Amino acid sequence: MGGQTEAIHGHDFYDEKLGAFLVPIYQMAIFEQPDRMTGETRKTDRGTDLKYSREENPTVRALEHILAKLDGGEDALGFSSGMAAIAAIYMALLRSGSRMVVSKEAYGTTIQLAEDLAKFGVETVLAGPDTEKIVEAIEPGTSLVLIETMTNPCLRIVDVPEIAKRCREVGARLVVDNTFVTPILYRPLKDGVDLVVHSATKYLAGHNDVVAGAVVGSKNLVDGVVWDWRRKLGSILAPFEAFLVIRGLKTLEVRIRRHCGNARAVAEYLSEHPRVAEVMYPGLPDNKYRKTAEKLFRDGLYGGMVSFRVRGGEEAAKKVLRKVRIIKPSPSLGGPESLLTYPIISAAAKMPPGIREELGITEDLLRLSVGLEDVDDIISDLDQALA
């Protein structure tokens, strides 16, 4: 089935007694075990026991089926947040003496947690942010590589197939955070990636009302390795939040297309504005990452994020944040509402000044998550704020 059909029907749930075809919320901590009718242990389709919602829950399991199909994986896991998903991956795939390569422009907390593992004997190397430097850092003996398809906040696009090739050469596992891109634009697993991770809080749930995370990949890694760490850490997604993500996924493709169309129009507007010094959007013809984006993404879509530099430095950037009306100053992304972020005080706040400067995360930089409003209203709001 196509992606939109999978997002609506990919959960395999049907209640024959009621004729119900929507996944219900199994708001239960425990399940009857063993089955009183058969005397046997109740099992999920994954082969694990269904007894306690810290380990398995039917609503979460339905979401996992949808996510696996959308990303082209064999199975998936739902987590209480994107960081919970990344923490479980670190615990599952690293040990004392491991060497890990993480993109310099990865999410700040992803980097912080990786560096904190030094006390357990894990070496973390920050590399990039471009493909060539990441590939150079993947030396023999590297255990794990973590990158983001589209970086935050400068919206660089890395060549995932090239990095996957290098990981195979040295025997490293490759994890790709595909939050900004979603499986609608790109499915990293088809290019040799081992695991895909999402902050489902963002585009997947899509309404700024859920905190959730997900991991997708092979049964061997997802069920055989990462699942047990989710169990031990107690970081499974709650059933109500899983229900909300399932609801959000049903409109994912139509939302992403609208986000992308609006973002392109906003980027073109900003690129002509006299008060804007630079626009970062991979869909612009002169963008450095346009060719890589065309290689990876489908249907001429380039994402719903636009970053730009305001002439006048920190003072001018903060004025824009204060003056927007429809657009909301907020550090998240991916919902119906357009959100404007000042990266230097959010995701990059704890980043060393030298790395911020190297990456181009400067005091004049703003990041816009372009929402689903009428694009003329978004542009009008930017216009009055810039003025």
Image (cartoon, rainbow, N blue to C red):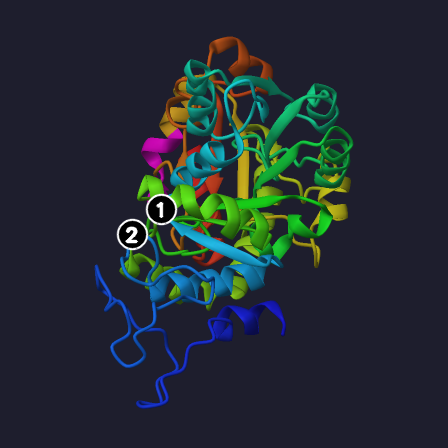
Q: Secondary structure at mark 2?
A: loop
For the residue pair 374 and 217, the one nearer the viewer reads as: 217
Left or right: 285, with 111 as reference point: right
Give, as a three-letter code, the residue at label 1.
Arg
Q: Is residue 328 magenta?
A: yes
The picture places residue 374, in percent across and down from the top left corner, at 46, 59
Above or below — where is 206 with respect to 65? above
Residue 261 lies in what quarter of the image? bottom right
Determine which of the numbered discs, if any, sits on residue 231 in the image: 1
Left or right: 95, with 2 as reference point: left
Q: Secondary structure at mark 1?
A: helix
For the residue pair 43 and 80, the one nearer the viewer reads as: 43
Whether residue 296 is visible here, answered yes or no, is yes
Q: Are marks 1 and 2 in contact (CB under 8 Å)?
A: yes
- Residue under the image location 72 percent in, 38 percent down: 164
The picture places residue 275, in percent across and down from the top left corner, at 53, 28
For the residue pair 173 and 339, the one nearer the viewer reads as: 173
For the residue pair 240 and 308, the one nearer the viewer reads as: 240
Give, as a three-letter code, the residue at label 2.
Arg
Above or below — where is 117 with respect to 245? above
| Mark 2 nearby-residue class (10 Å; few <14, some 14–19, many ≥20) | some
Q: Give the quarter of the figure containing the C terminus.
A: top left
Badge 2 is on which residue?
A: 54
Q: Which residues are magenta?
A: 320-329
- Residue under the image location 31 percent in, 89 percent down: 18
- Residue under the image location 22 percent in, 63 percent down: 28
Q: How many marks?
A: 2
